[in-house]
Image (tube, helix red, strand yellow):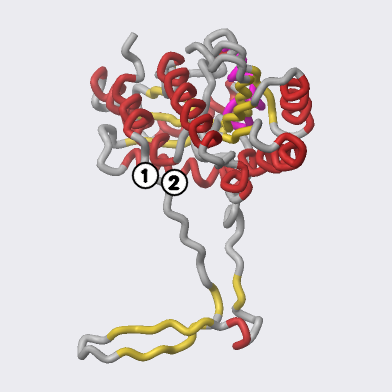
Amino acid sequence: MTGATGVQIVLVGGHESDDARDLERFEPLVDGARTTVAGRALHNIVSAALDHGDPVVVLPMTFGRDPAMVADAAKTLRWLNRTHAGRIALTAPFGQIDHLTAWLRTAANRASLVDPASALLIVAPHSNPFDEAELHRVGYLVATHGALDEVAVAIADDGAQLSAAAARLRRLGATRIVAVPAGFAASLPAADVEFGGPVMSDASIVRVIGTRVRDALAALDAGDDGIDTGLLADHGHGYAHSHAFEGEAHAHPHPHDHADGTRHSHTHGGLHAHVHHPHDSDALALSDAHHDHDH
């Protein structure tokens, strides 16, 4: 992919890319791209580009499992934007959980074509309980209506932990275990498993990067730098909060319709939930799930 002329593209990584180390291979594939983690390192790269006179597009490289990284990047850009408004854009995250689920289902389909009795092992390093739990939820969704009967998640930092997860599957009767990384890794630690390839090909990843950058530049021209949206990325992430013991002052009235056509309102105290609906999945990214390994 050829980067936009005179634009500094910055790919920001977190626990899904081994703190951006798994993104370094994309620097020569995306002209002018730099890779970094959020925080001071991102601040320094963006500041240097701005001082050089280049506009900057920052892309959070997450499959939807690291919202805190997106928010951290947005906080850094908000600070810099005070003196460089109109020259910094934060893209939408690389992917969403819906995309990751589709890509992993494609990996399950590939494994099933070789042996329908295969087990799929989805692998990610330790991060935090919430993002790890999200991957277990994704694994369940991959198994539901999927091509394989056995889909498991391994939170593993090295070959020994990965082999231990494979051993648990063998005790359940699995004879062929195909392991795929849930992030941007191009390989996995050596272990007693069959490597099922990265979840997406590099060419597919580069195509999505190009789409995110072009969309962000168009939005910036229209007056939307994406930073405010990024600041809310981790809203509601973590433990649910409750007002159960805060008394009726925080209760909320809710109207209810009944079958006879009448309506009345009453108040629920206690726990309330914030429900967030993801944006519609873009057709390009989802289509890459099916062309991922077309070379």
Decide if residue 195 is on the left or right side of residue 189: left
Residue 15 covered by magenta stretch: yes
User: For residue 96, which quarter of the picture?
Assistant: top left
Dominant secondary-structure state across the stretch colored magenta: helix
Answer yes or no: is residue 92 visible. Answer: no
- How far apart marks 1 and 2 lie (CA) works out to 20 Å
The circle on residue 137 is: 2
Above or below, 280 against 247 in this view is above
Of 51 and 90, which appears nearest the observer? 51
Above or below, 283 against 115 in this view is below
The circle on residue 280 is: 1
Q: Amino acid at mark 1?
A: Asp
Q: Nearer the viewer, mark 1 or mark 2?
A: 1
- The picture places residue 204, in percent across and down from the top left corner, at 41, 19
Tell me the crowding category of disc 1: few under 14, some 14 to 19, or many 20 or more residues within 10 angstroms, Cα based. Answer: few
Q: Amino acid at mark 2?
A: Arg
